[in-house]
Amino acid sequence: MPPKKQVVEEKIQLGRPGNNLKIGVVGLPNVGKSTFFNAITSSSVPAENYPFCTIEPEESRVAVPDDRLDWLFTLYTSKKIPAFLTIIDIAGLVKGASEGHGLGNAFLSHISAVDGIFHVVRAFDDPDVVHVDDEVNPGRDLETIHNELRLKDTAMLNKYIDGNARNIERMGSGGTVDDKKRKEEFAIVTKVRDWVVAGNDVRKGNWSNREVDVINAQPLLTSKPVTYLANVSEKDYIRKKNKYLPAIKKWIDENNPGDKLIPFSGVFETALAALSEDAAAAAQFLESKGAVSAFPKIITLGYDQLHLMHFFTAGEVEVRAWTCRKGVKMTEAARCIHNDIADSLIQVDVMKFDDLKAAGSEADLRAAGKLHIRGKDAIIEDGDIVYFRSGMGRAKK
């Protein structure tokens, strides 16, 4: 008999499932969070020079740049609709926030509601912009934020442990199936608590699928992916040199290796955003500065860190980028468009973007035999151009 085919268990991701995910902008007061948010969303959140200028979180959507969507638009000459990333500006955090100092409790509850973090750290000197700790020290600032997040996670995990310890002890070594499940969950939460107390972020642990299930049931702050954004002066951004960046990079490599760092200039981006309705003036501004905006890279990386990707629908009415989690089946991708399409999905016509671009048209792609028919349980891939065939008829051409 041939050996049995081994089934590889699909790795569950940390974080809540879903396609409408959000990123929160966090950091100490006066590091440039609201300036960043205002420029990237072209909104008008106050950006004053005093702590806790932002109290209630502000929310906005930004288009995710994708050259493939632009090319499809030129091919189909129909309405173009990009995918969006939701960004939330969250109030500044100070040391002691986990104990309620400053706007701590509100701040931390707002972080619980997002799925990823843009951590803005100050990397510029300006005597007119006060620092909450009186001097610019990025390493200390980074440590402050992460310590407060870990302390809050520790408090939440301890609350669960303290509230269940007596009942778990009463169960002893036996018990029902449900008792064994509760004891397993208790052991996992205790393991995660010990990991956090040791100075680690939850997201950096090597967790089993069962452990991830338990972790995802807890609103843990350090389980969320983080991208670090260093706010530098306009001069430093243009010349691509800053005295604080090596220390920031060193801190990341020592504490959260693998996390990304992107420098940007709030002053530069604000000036560029003011020209957003005048393409010629914006182009002239960029040429005069010899620099480009960091925002497309930041948005794309934020989108990627949430394990999101694009698939497309294209036709005479519109070309559209849709957002879904990486690794989902066709059924779940269809659900991004409409539940009824997903529930009655039969099969999917799939064109690979590179194949379509090489062919030059749908007709030539079909003639080359490059149109693929996939079942509803197939995995959708980044850049797929799809026609969902369902009981509702041919959906979303």
Image (spheres, rainbow, N blue to C red):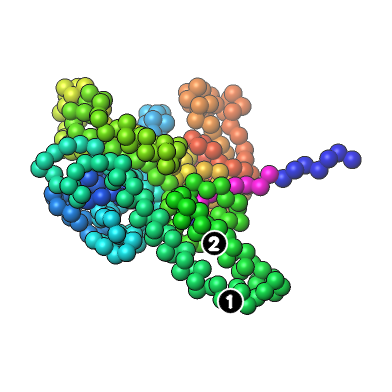
Dot 2 alpha-carbon crowd within 10 angstroms: few under 14, some 14 to 19, many 20 or more:
some
Report helix, strand or loop for mark 2. helix
Residue extent of the magenta highlight: 8-15
Q: Could you tell me the amino acid type at mark 1?
A: Asn
Q: Nearer the viewer, residue 196 or 112?
A: 196
Q: Could you tell me the amino acid type at mark 2?
A: Thr
Dominant SS type (magenta): loop
Quarter in which the N terminus is drawn: top right
- What residue did someone put label 2 on? 190
Q: Inspect the magenta stretch and tell me whether residue 12 lies in it.
A: yes
- Name the residue: 44% across, 51% down: 199
Q: Position of residue 253 (x, y in %)?
A: 42, 36
- Name the residue: 14% across, 52% down: 50
- What residue did someone put label 1 on? 167
Horizontal side of residue 171 vs 337, given as left or right: right
Residue 70 seen in render: yes
In the rendered view, tell whether residue 325 sits above or below residue 93: above
Which mark is first along the chain, 1 or 2? Answer: 1
- Name the residue: 13% across, 44% down: 129
Q: Position of residue 135 (x, y in %)?
A: 19, 43
Q: Position of residue 104 (x, y in %)?
A: 29, 61
Q: Nearer the viewer, residue 197 or 279?
A: 197
Horizontal side of residue 179 vs 63, given as left or right: right
Find out whether the residues at labels 2 and 1 contact each other: C-beta distance under 8 Å.
Answer: no
Report helix, strand or loop for mark 1. helix
- Name the residue: 49% across, 35% down: 383
Q: Inspect the magenta stretch and tell me whether residue 229 lies in it.
A: no
Between marks 2 and 1, how big is the CA–CA gap? 15 Å
